[in-house]
Image: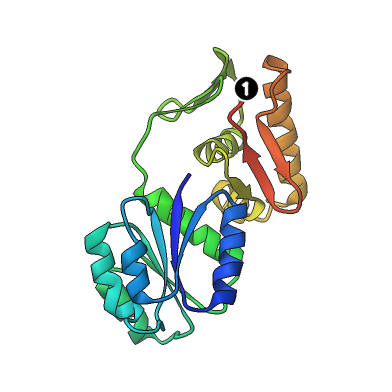
Amino acid sequence: MKTILIIEDDSVIQDMLKIFLTRNGFSVLSAYSGTEGLLVHGKNVDLILLDLMLPGKSGRDIIEDLRKKNDVPVIVMSAVSDISSKVDMFGKGADDYITKPFHNEELLARINARFKEHRPVVSEISVGGLVIKTDEHTVSLNGVVIPFSKYEYDIVLILAENCGRIVTKSTLFERVWDYAAEADENTLNVHMSRIRKKLKDIDPETEYIETVRGVGYRMKSGR
């Protein structure tokens, strides 16, 4: 499970983000000032959400020190939208910059994008009896190769990469179809139904993919 450190002095935003990120399978740490952020940050943190306007040391003041402690992706959150501020933060080491107020789904997409960029290249992913060989673009279950279409393969791969975490429908539309016109709720439902049937044909006792109503899907670890 990935751990995200939120450095934000607004308790309402802190609570909202903590609930949202926890529901999406992340572990969350909180800090309410720049100084506290430096103290909380450590080797267990995988990504930082950093507010700029903090009491004491600001986000600008601490970003380089955060990098020195543990160099992980940093997404700056700020109501300041002028280009000079964004350029300044990128120059100091920010990986991304999102302007307040923002939609939670956009923030989640940005977080997932940062993890995608920083994750090591793997040639095989295993979830229970499910084995995905990314170099061969094949999926097998209990030793039986499953004839997935390109879209089905991409969906299963994304779910497996995020095993145990919710993958939103928006994320699937973005990564599988790149928001193409043919990508709609019905199309996604049809593909998910086909994927589940192919898995059930081989292993009828195990439910690999869970539907999280109104949000998306989550791959479970199998037996």
36 sits to left or right of 125: left
Q: Which percent across, then down, holds residue 223?
A: 62, 22
- Residue located 57% across and 39% down the image: 164
- Callout 1 environment at 10 Å: few (<14), some (14 to 19), or many (20+)? few
- Residue located 35% across and 59% down the image: 73
Q: Amino acid at mark 1?
A: Arg
Corner quadrant of residue 113: bottom left
Q: Which percent across, then down, holds residue 205?
A: 72, 18
Q: Nearer the viewer, residue 190 or 111?
A: 111
Q: Which percent across, then down, holds residue 44?
A: 36, 50
Q: Nearer the viewer, residue 198 or 96?
A: 96
39 sits to left or right of 79: left
Identify whether 11 is placed above or below 1. below
Determine the secondary structure under disc 1. loop
Q: Nearer the viewer, residue 209 or 151?
A: 209
- The residue labelled by disc 1 is 223
Instruction: Kindly give the residue lying farthest to the top in the view shown.
Output: 143
Identify whether 52 is placed above or below 46. below
- Residue located 61% across and 56% down the image: 179
